[in-house]
Amino acid sequence: MMKMSLKKTLPIFFLLLAVSVAIYAFQYYSSIFNEQNLKAIDIQLINGNAISDDNTLEHFLLSSENRANLALALASVNKTDFKPQQIIQQYSMILHNRRGFSREYTLFFTEDASVLLEKHQENDSLYKVEEPNFFYSHEGFRDIYSERLTPALQVNLNEDQVPFFKIDERWSYLRYDGQWISEDLDLDKDAVNNNVVTINTSKDKLAVRTDKAPDHSHLKVVELATDEVVFEDEVDLNQLPFPDANGRYNYELSLVWNDESKFYRGEAVINIPVIIDLPAKFVFSKERITQGELLEISVYNVADTEDIFVEQSIYNDFRMFNQDGFIRGYIPTNYSTEPGHYQIKYGSRKKGIEFSQEIEVVAHSYRIQHLTIDEEIEQETRNDAAYDEFAKYFTPVRKQSEPNRYYTEPFILPAKGRLTTEFGQTRYVNGEPTSSRHSGLDIAAPKGTEIKATNRGKVVLAMPLILTGNTIVIDHGEGLFSVYYHMHESFVTVGEIVERGQKIGIVGTTGFSTGPHLHFILSYYTMNIEPGFLIVEQPITFANYLKFMQN
């Protein structure tokens, strides 16, 4: 009977043992999350201590490489009592294995690039991950890199946000594992931005704001009507510049981030369509000028000279020139200009606006000079034939001028020597008063002394004349001319463009002359002006010429 009971119970025992081992083995192998057993991972960003509605749960199947890296990370953990302080991101992470089992963790990424792992199944025990490359490189943890985010760009007119169009963008960032990663950016380059920014006052502020300051900000401004680049340079993003003339423009702003000390690099190009519609701005070079000085009036924010007016009684033949994106005009004065106060009315015909500016012309004390000339020289050079020749060849060339400036640099003295006659002096020749005042500066120098062009310009006369000897006239544009008399020899031809400082002749004593010298004139068309104002910003006189002519 006992033998029968033992025979019956042993199979049951072994069956139960086998079932227990099977259950244990199933539970053991099902709970393993190793390289062979891992299948997928759920990742969700936590804001503070709670999962935000904005952060959706992301589910990722694990590739063989990911399984290996994750298994390595999990195997490298060491229990720690360290409590994370400077947390940059916090995640909920759920692992899934091939048996359908899951395991939940909380991950902490700290400012020093450490990764801490909290195991929920072990009463929230905290571990430090010694091999964290999986967490540095996996797409699900991309928010640990603020550097991966492309710069947030915003264009503001004053305090209002205005539209712009991004036409190019490239961006990369450095991961904690030392890899540079390029972000895939989706730009619609065929999109058209029909919104336009309108600038109405010079006080408007067009600025670009960004959360990552670029290392270079290069702006190119193109006038759409002419396709001309009117500005191209580095700019301050706090105030983008405005063109000098009204019109429609495209602002192409190129931004570059390439600081090697930063963990990101990139480029972005944006377009901002802009309309400049500023009121006309008139700028007077001075409010008080001396006889012989040239008053310059510059007008900004106007494209057409017909849109503006200037009314004055100082000079009868006032005209305006349109160049370099703004309009410019001159009012010349000399010894014939009456000293006093003058009212200049100016404004915009287009907008019906009128203003007034008072200009004072101050008297200059002109000297008197007595010359004794050999009567034979006077008869040979001051006669009807000489005057007719002068009127035929010299007088007409200063009545027409190139409307654009030839020059970009200041004027210079054409020769060094001794001043023998100031501008504007009244002359008596052999005891008789002359009919005109001295038209320029007489610079005495040895025969053969070099004469230079006072500035860049076009030669419009180069010939010997009975009255003035070897003579050169250069048109500098916008009505400004320089004249050179009595040269021994000239080295230029009509139509030639001469450069500032170029040797154009040598000193002589040809024509109506008492000795080797250069008679030098600057004029606005046919009205002679004091050369010193354009060259040294003051009259050149016997009292100061040594300072300018012999240094």
Image (tube, grey):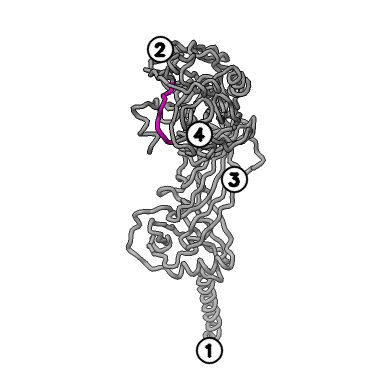
Horizontal and vertical percent position of residue 204:
47, 27
Front residue of 323/516: it is 516
**Mark 3 — residue?**
168
Mark closer to the chain start, 3 or 4: 3
> Which mark is in front, 1 or 2?
2
Q: Dot 1: within a 10 Å radius of its alpha carbon, few (fewer than 14), some, or many (20 or more) residues?
A: few
Residue 339's disc number: 2
Rendered view: 286 above or below 341? below
Q: CA distance from mark 1 to mark 2?
A: 148 Å
Mark closer to the chain start, 3 or 2: 3
> Which mark is in front, 3 or 2?
2
> Which mark is in front, 1 or 3?
3
| Amino acid type, residue under disc 3 in the picture | Asp
Residue 64's disc number: none
Q: Is residue 211 magenta?
A: no
**Mark 1 — residue?**
3
Residue 508's disc number: 4
Q: CA distance from mark 3 to mark 2?
A: 62 Å
| Amino acid type, residue under disc 2 in the picture | Pro
- The residue shown at (54%, 27%) is 511
Q: CA distance from mark 1 to mark 3?
A: 91 Å
- The residue shown at (56%, 82%) is 11
Q: CA distance from mark 4 to mark 2?
A: 37 Å
Disc 1 to disc 3: CB gap under 8 Å:
no
Numbered range of the magenta stretch: 416-423
Disc 4 to disc 2: CB gap under 8 Å:
no
Horizontal and vertical percent position of residue 126:
38, 62
Rendered view: 224 above or below 114? above
